[in-house]
Amino acid sequence: MDKSLNKIKTKFKGFNWEIYSQVAINSTNIDDPFRHCDCRIGKNKGFCNHFWIGVIYSLKEKYFKTSDWTLTTLPSDFAQKLSQVKVISGNKGEKQLVPSSFKKKKLSDPATKRPSKNVTKQWAISSYTNPHKQYTVTLYKNMSWACSCPHWVYRKAICKHIRECQSKSYS
Ligand SMILES: [Zn+2]
Ligand SMILES: [Zn+2]
């Protein structure tokens, strides 16, 4: 993007088509802004939808003010359209025009992977009878213990696994 010219290149992508559109609006050319678009209307220097996207983007980036626009009457729903979109930075640093309600997806929420807040520590202890099996021993903030083995789950008895972890954590 050529900042001095406020040139905006946009790419519109469909399933089997792509339209490249360029708009450059600044104080010196606002009466006849530079525009180029691959689409049929744009080729004839018309004001196509792609052009208006560029205009909206330029306004969002404060390249000019709506009141400076004298070239055409703005579409009647223009102000509404303008309030419905915002500019965000994409993952590759590219700018995107998205609906105002759009929220960036978080790649992963670490909070969901972390054990519950009340957990002080957790251990994975191999079963004594079956080395392929592992039980999870948990020490809670209130100093109570739990284990995922049947001994604890069904009888709530302090099992070997908990004892092992107790000796580990107190030694
Ligand atoms: Zn166009
Ligand atoms: Zn156990």
Image (cartoon, rainbow, N blue to C red):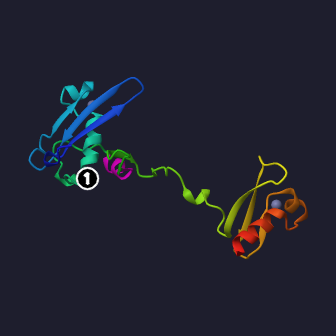
Left or right: where 3 falls relative to 130: left
Q: Is residue 2 above or below residue 110?
A: above
- What is the quadrant of the C terminus in the image? bottom right
- Location of residue 27 in the rendering, given as x and y in whole percent from the top left corner: 11, 50
Residue occupied by mark 1: 61
Q: Residue furthest left?
A: 28
Name the residue rendered at 41%, 52% in the picture.
Answer: 100
User: Is residue 55 covered in magenta?
Assistant: no
Q: Main secondary structure of the magenta part?
A: helix
Looking at the picture, how far across and down is residue 107, in whole percent? 50, 49
Q: Classify residue 112 by image quadrant.
A: bottom right
In the image, residue 120 lies at what x, y percent?
66, 70
Rendered image quadrant of residue 39 = top left
Q: Is residue 83 magenta?
A: yes
SS class, disc 1:
loop
In front: 38, or 84? 38
What span is colored magenta in the figure?
78-86
Q: Nearer the viewer, residue 69 or 23?
A: 23
